[in-house]
Amino acid sequence: MKKLKKKLLWLVKKPKFILVVYILLAIIISFQEFLLSKPGDRFTHYNNFIIFRQSFLHLIQNKDLYIAHPDVQYDLFKYSPAFAVFMGAFAYLPMLAGLILWNALNAAVLWFAIKSLPVKNKIVTVSIAWFVVIELITSMQNSQSNVLMAGLLILAFCFLERRNIALATLMICLTVFIKIFGLVAFSLFLLYPEKKKFILWSALWIVLLILLPLMVVSPAQLIFLYKSWYAMLSMDYSGSWGISVMGWLHTWFHFDPPKNVITLLGIAIFCLPLLFYKRFGEEIFRNLFLSSILIWVIIFNHKAESATFIIAVCGIAIWYFMQQRTTLNFILLLLAFIFTMLSPTDLFPPVVRNSFMVPYTMKVFPCILIWLKIIWEMMVASYKPRVMPG
């Protein structure tokens, strides 16, 4: 029994084993969502993947990507024309094969990103990888792009730490052309030298990604699509509060200030640690800044939903496992585990989820507390690296 326990413990510490688990989860979840959907259903369990897949077909047919297409999908496509081009890799595959490949790609990118984090002790990265599994499952059950977004944002940081400016800026630009809130990650360049190089590479990638759809559409059609995308995003902004700071203020306090005001206040608080430029050289400061970005883009996102929180949970995991353990940090982590990660699961009875967890946006509350703690740590805390047994 002891030998079996020792062997299992050895196995769970292996990054390659975690990759196998991630990919198996992607396959199992894809089969599950596919089999739960019946032929002819207007809304399938993998509707997001259908939207992504159809975007390429609509693109090459010179259709407006940003209007309803109720004959083939439920809800709108909200990403860039460049993203639609990339989805051409999945457009002609059988539906189940494409869904499996899409979820596996998301999972593999996140695994590689976590594995690439600049830490000396592999137990730290293993702990992060295991901690985010529940939220990984939640996101993949919605066949969303959030796992990919989290992976790309973390990879941008990893490449910057290795001074690979070209790949770092490519990762950030890819996030922007998936979801516009990836723009926040450009703030990373303030922590590193070679800022001119960063700006030049960013400009190059942005131009290339803007023009990428010209491979399949005319210049006039591309201009039309960007105008339509902008119009759709403008209308989308006023539509909801989401599971965000705005939603929390609304549900807890019935306080509904303009979203722009809340966002600007969030930006101001987010930027406060940048005043402490002498700390930029500290590795833990940069780790915390990455965590701040990953959490900020969710808690200040008026469209945040349960499936997006894989991004914030990655930030929470990096924050906790990359520094010395404290009682307060553990309590905050426990709150995040219970209310952020477990609240959408069947561990909570439907009556609790529907009457308390969802109406009071409990999923976001621990993230807000942790983000404020991160801001405080970057400015005034005397933190130490996490010391863990090998």
Image (spheres, rainbow, N blue to C red):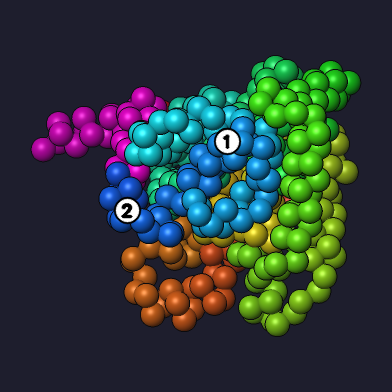
Say if the magenta span includes residue 350: no
The earlier-in-sequence mark between 1 and 2 is 2
Spot occupied by residue 138 in the image (x, y as percentages of width and height): 43, 53
Give the side of residue 167 with respect to residue 113, left or right: right
Q: Quadrant of residue 275?
A: top right
Q: What stretch is highlighted in magenta?
A: 1-30
Residue highlighted by disc 1: 56
> Helix, strand or loop at disc 2?
loop
Left or right: where does residue 155 sit relative to residue 199?
left
Q: In which quarter of the image is the N terminus?
A: top left
The residue wearing badge 2 is: 39
Percent position (x, y) of residue 36?
30, 55
Q: Which of 254 and 239 is in front in this view?
A: 239
Q: In this orientation, does residue 232 appear?
A: yes
For the point 34% across and 74% down, the residue is 349
- Could you tell me which quadrant the C terminus lies in? top left
Which residue type carries mark 1? Phe
Q: Which amino acid does label 2 sit on?
A: Pro
Q: Residue at x 48, y 33 (%)?
A: 91
Q: Crowdedness of circle 1 by 10 Å Cα count: few (<14), some, many (20+)?
A: many
Q: What element carries label 1?
A: helix
| Residue lying at 81% horizontally and 34% vertically, measured from the top left | 220
Indicate whether 133 appears above or below 215: below
**Residue 254 picture quarter:** bottom right
Q: How far apart are marks 1 and 2 (CA)?
A: 22 Å
Instruction: Locate residue 119, reporting x and y percent.
Output: 55, 27
Question: Which secondary structure is most common in the magenta stretch?
Answer: helix
Q: Which of 336 and 253 is in front in this view?
A: 253
